[in-house]
Image (tube, grey):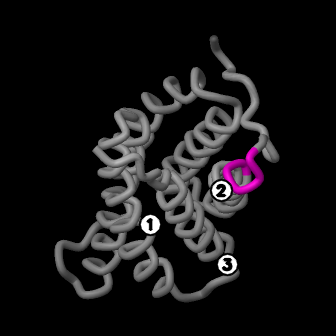
Amino acid sequence: MSDQKLGNPAVVGLAGFGLTTFLLQFHNVGWMSGIGPVVWVGLVLGGTAQLIAGLQEMKTGNNFGYCAFTSYGAFWIALCLILLGNKFDVYKSSTTDIGWFLVAWTLFTTILWVGSLRIHGAMAFTFTTLLIGFILLDLAHFGFEKLTVLAGYELMICAAAAWYMMARIILNELYGREVLPAGKPWIS
């Protein structure tokens, strides 16, 4: 058996989640007019790389990371395929259809949010902002369209929180001490 140290797959998962979330929110708040970068980065980094990170988390025995990264990687791939399907008139989805897609993900996120409360403060904060963002997007797709911009700004906070956790893992290891703290679990 090898004593070689392995990398933490969470850094790739958090990188993909954060970057793709930022890009979609840049579009949602109106800074980006096109959806192309969201689709392509969503398929490659937010989707595929995050999915691979999740599968690597399985090998570490981290069920939370395994479930979160694999599932949200699949979320990005599915969302990008929905956007491509709408663009090319293949299995078109209405605003309401996408709303129900988001509601299902909101319910899923609620389960992980409950789990995140016992991990550490940074994780709880990230999942709290993700859950709030999903709820706002749900409402935006069911008649409260102006909430899309609010959701965009709120989810940029979520993306930044994911990158904070990524930076925490990388910098704490490189410096050999806790440079960036995670905070205590919100529920012990």
Does 173 sit left or right of 1 as displayed? right
Q: Residue at x 41, y 82 (%)?
A: 40
Q: Residue at x 39, y 66 (%)?
A: 49
Q: Secondary structure at mark 3?
A: loop
Callout 2: 10 Å neighbours few (<14), some, many (20+)? some
In this rendering, the count of numbered labels is 3
Q: Secondary structure at mark 2?
A: helix
Does 24 sit left or right of 108 as displayed? right
Q: CA distance from mark 2 to mark 3?
A: 32 Å
Span highlighted in magenta in the image: 172-176
Q: Nearer the viewer, mark 1 or mark 3?
A: 1
163 vs 133, nearest the viewer: 163
Q: CA distance from mark 1 to mark 2?
A: 19 Å
Q: Which residue is mark 2?
A: 170
Q: Residue at x 33, y 48 (%)?
A: 2
Which quadrant of the structure image shows residue 26?
bottom right
> Is residue 150 in view from this perspective?
no
Residue at the farthest right position: 179
Q: Main secondary structure of the magenta part?
A: helix
Q: Which residue is mark 1?
A: 46
> Is residue 2 in view from this perspective?
yes
Check disc 1 and give the amino acid type.
Gly
Does 160 sit left or right of 134 as displayed? right
Q: Which residue is mark 3?
A: 30
* N-terminal-most mark, 1 or 2: 1
Q: Nearer the viewer, mark 1 or mark 2?
A: 2
183 vs 22, nearest the viewer: 183
Check disc 3 and give the amino acid type.
Gly
Q: Give the x, y percent position of residue 158.
A: 65, 51
Q: CA distance from mark 1 to mark 3?
A: 20 Å
Q: Give the x, y percent position of residue 163.
A: 66, 57
